[in-house]
Image (cartoon, rainbow, N blue to C red):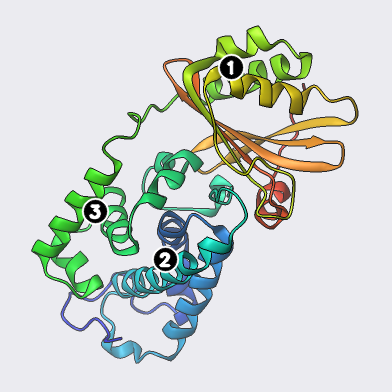
Amino acid sequence: MEPDRDHVPHATRGLTLDDEFQAARPMLAGLAYRLLGSWHDAEDVLQEAYLRWAVVEHSTVREPRRYLTRVVTRLAIDSLRTRQARRESYVGDWLPEPAPADLFGGPDPSDLSLAVLHLMERLTPVQRAVHVLRTAFVIPYDEIADILGRSPEDCRQLLRRAKDALADSRARFTPTRNEQERLLSDFVAAARSGDLERLKGLLRADAVAWSDGGGRAKAARRPIHGADKVARFIGRLYSRPGLFNAVVLDLAGERALLVELGEVPHVLTLELEAGQVVGIRLVTNPDKLSVAASRAASWDK
């Protein structure tokens, strides 16, 4: 990969190699996670980016952040392509990996919710890269073109195709943190009591529930559609006798619950619109729970 040579020297010149990378790392983490929907994959990309940063001729890199953005984006695209090739063997639905909010820097994190990242799986790796770079980081088309090795017009076309692919999705609705916590609490209370009518009252008629066990934990293999079926599924799951515990998680882009049923944990997120639940995501795959669980905050029920 060619270094950046043609730009005004970066304001952090004089910092050590490690300092420059660490100064950019929160932004790079947000970029990698948006592109991959997996914190573990994002960490792998950041580690590889650092190794490349360590050996580049730094006197030729005038804008470290821009150079690192290009490296991380290209590595993430390669990772996405590899993951897509493996996806056919994944057991059940694939959901993004929950990640705590304090891991990221950069723009507004509202586009880091599991709902948004799940939706982004519709895009090709290059479409996803253009969409993230342009909409989340507001990077100019000529710079995106340089990152991807394409023309600015190609990048405009890719963004249009990405928007078309996402156009039939629900309109994004960002509730307040208080509303998220209230509906999470009401939802779990109704499910625990086995009150299906109350639970259905919280759901929009076309609500969908996804669960991701990855073959490592019990989960529905396919999405469950419709308020009635979703209420019965969640009610059966949460009203089982035995140990139950829930703690609040401050994930990137949303509030969530880390729920323990018996000795089996999962992360629960609710996609909300106009005060109703339109999407439910249960991540039970233990490979995707370790980072979120380590940051769980206590919550008095």
Distance (Cα) linking label 3 and label 1: 39 Å
- SS at circle 3: helix
The amino acid pointed to by label 2 is: Ala
Single out the mark in the foreground, 3 or 1: 1
- Residue visible at 32% across and 57% down in the picture: 128
Which residue position is annotated with label 1? 228
x%, y% of residue 114? 50, 42
Question: Quick one: label 3, few (<14), some, or many (20+) residues within 10 Å?
Answer: some
Quarter of the figure with the N terminus: bottom left
Distance (Cα) linking label 2 and label 1: 47 Å
In this view, the residue in front, 64 or 101, is 101
56, above or below 10, in the image: below
Q: How crowded is mark 2: few (under 14 residues within 10 Å), some or many (20 or more)?
A: some
Where residue 174 sits: x, y (%)? 41, 28
Query: Along the polypeptide, which appears first: circle 2 or circle 3?
Result: 2
- At label 1, the amino acid type is Asp
- Judge the density around disc 1: few (<14), some (14-19), many (≥20) Cα neighbours within 10 Å: some
What residue does disc 3 label?
134
x, y percent for residue 146: 19, 73
Type of residue at label 3? Arg
**189 to the left or right of 13:** right
Tell me which label, 2 or 1, sits earlier in the chain.
2
- From the viewer's perspective, is residue 5 above or below residue 75? below
**What is the distance, in whole Å, between disc 2 and disc 3 at their CAs?**
18 Å
Mark 2, residue position: 24
- Position of the C terminus by quadrant: top right
Q: Is residue 142 visible?
A: yes
Residue at 65% x, 40% y is 220
